[in-house]
Amino acid sequence: MPLLPDAAGRPLRSLRISVTDRCNLRCAYCMPEEEYVWLPHEQFLRFEEIRALVDVFARLGVDKVRLTGGEPLLRRDLPVLVRLLAGQPALRDLALTTNGILLPRLAEPLFAAGLRRVTVSLDTLRHDRFRALTRRDELDATLAGIDAAAAAARAHGREGLKLDSVILRGVNDDELGDLLEYGRTVGAEVRFVEYMDVGGATRWRQGRVFPRAEMLERMAARYGAIEPLPPTDSAPAARFRLRDGTVFGIISSTTQPFCGTCDRARLTADGRLFLCLYARTGLDLRQPLRDGATPEELADRIAPAWRGRRDRGAEERLRVAERAPLLRAAELRRDPHLEMHTRGG
Ligand code: SAM
Ligand code: SF4
Ligand code: SF4
C-alpha cells in the first residue's frame, strides 16, 4: 500500500489513541493544577468506534497503535479494546503507555488479549520524591505493576518492556544511573525524557530542563564510553549502548526535536484528531462517525488533513527566544483538548 505523505513528505504510520483523559496521578510536569475540566463521558468513543477508526487509519498506512491517556488503565474493560484492535491484521504493533499502578491486575489480561508492548512511566525510585512529583503515594503499586508487566510479557513471549523517565533538573537528575540499574533488574530498556513545554506543563521553566547533552555527560561519568546506536524505525528515542552492553534511550524533544521524521497522529478519547502534540486545533471524527459516515468518507476527511500537514511544533518552540509555558491554565480550562493528558503525550 502506498504511504500517505504529508506536506513535508512524512508518511502517516503511527497513531496514539487516548482512551480517557482521567488520571490517578497528578504529575507536576503534566497535571499540576488543583482542578480540571474533563471531557464528558458520553462523548468518549466506544470500543467499536475506536476499532472502526483504526480500520480507516490502517487503510491510510498506520501500522502502529499505542493506547494512552490520561491513565489508559482507568478505562473500564481495556482488554476488550485490545482484543478488538489486535484483530486488525494491518497492525504490526499494539502498545500501551501507562503509569503502571493498575498493571498488577491488568497486565495478564492485556497481554492475553494481544497487547505487544508496554511502556511504564517511572521518574523516581524514592518514595518521598514520588509523592512530591505525582501528589500520590503509589510508588510501590507502580513497581509491582512493572513486575507484573515483565512477568506477563514473558509468559506470552512478548518483548520490549520500556521505562520512560522525565528528568527534571534539581528534582531527579541524580537518579539516571539508579533508574538504569533498576531497568536492568526487570529487563526493561530505560528512556530518559526531556521536560517539554507542552499544554498542561504550566510550571515549565527552561531552567528545569535537563538536556540530552547533560544526560550523556552524567552517564559517561558513571559508566565510561557511550556508543550511539543507529536509529530504529521512526521511534523518537535516540539509543545508546554502555560498555557492558546495556542500551538506553533519550527523547530530546526539547533541545533536539525530531519533527523531521514524525509520522504520528493523535486521537483523543472523544474522537478528535491532532496532527502534532503542539497543534492548537484538531479534526473531529466522532460526529461524522456517529452520523454514519462510511470508511471511505472518513478516509476522505483524514487524508487531506494529513497531506496538508506542516506541523513542526517542537522545532518551532526551539526558535522562541524567551521561552515560557506554552499555555496558561485559563486557556487549558477553556479548551481541555490542549492538555497533554487529553491528547495522550
Ligand atoms: N498516564 C500515562 C503515563 O504517564 O504513562 C500515559 C499518558 S502520559 C500523558 C504519556 C507520557 O507523557 C508519560 O510518559 C509522561 O511522562 C509524558 N509527559 C507528560 N508531560 C510531559 C512533559 N511536560 N514533558 C515530557 N513528558 C511528559
Ligand atoms: Fe502523570 Fe501520565 Fe497522569 Fe500525566 S497522564 S499526570 S504523566 S500519570
Ligand atoms: Fe511530531 Fe509535533 Fe512532536 Fe514535532 S512536535 S515530533 S511534529 S508531534
Image (cartoon, grey):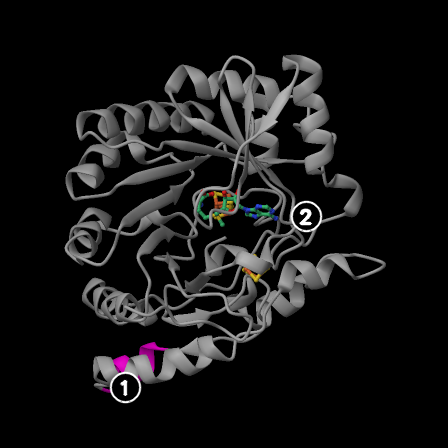
Mark 1 residue type: Glu
In this picture, residue 94 sits left or right of residue 345: left
**Residue 256, disc:** 2
Which residue appears at 68% of the width and 49% of the height? 254
Give me the C-alpha separation between circle 1 and circle 2: 38 Å
Q: Which residue is mark 1?
A: 297
The span picked out in magenta is 285-291
Which percent across, then down, holds residue 139? Answer: 46, 26
Vertical comparison of 153 with 235: above or below: above
Question: SS at mark 2?
Answer: loop
Image position of 97 (left or right of 34): left
Snapshot quadrant of residue 133: top right
First of labels 1, 2 by sequence position: 2
Residue drawn at x 24%, y 49% as measured from the top left: 78
Q: What secondary structure prevails in the magenta region?
A: helix
Q: Amino acid at mark 2?
A: Gln
Q: Is 337 situated above or below 157?
A: below
- Residue 56, given in percent of the width and then of the height, sits at 26, 72
| Disc 1, SS | helix
Query: Residue 287 magenta-drawn?
Result: yes
| Residue 154 painted magenta | no
Residue 43 location, x and y as percent?
Answer: 33, 71
- Residue 128 versus residue 271: which sits nearer the camera? 271
Residue 290 found in image quarter: bottom left
- Residue at image point 70% right, 22% down: 218
Q: Is mark 1 within 8 Å of ligand 3?
A: no
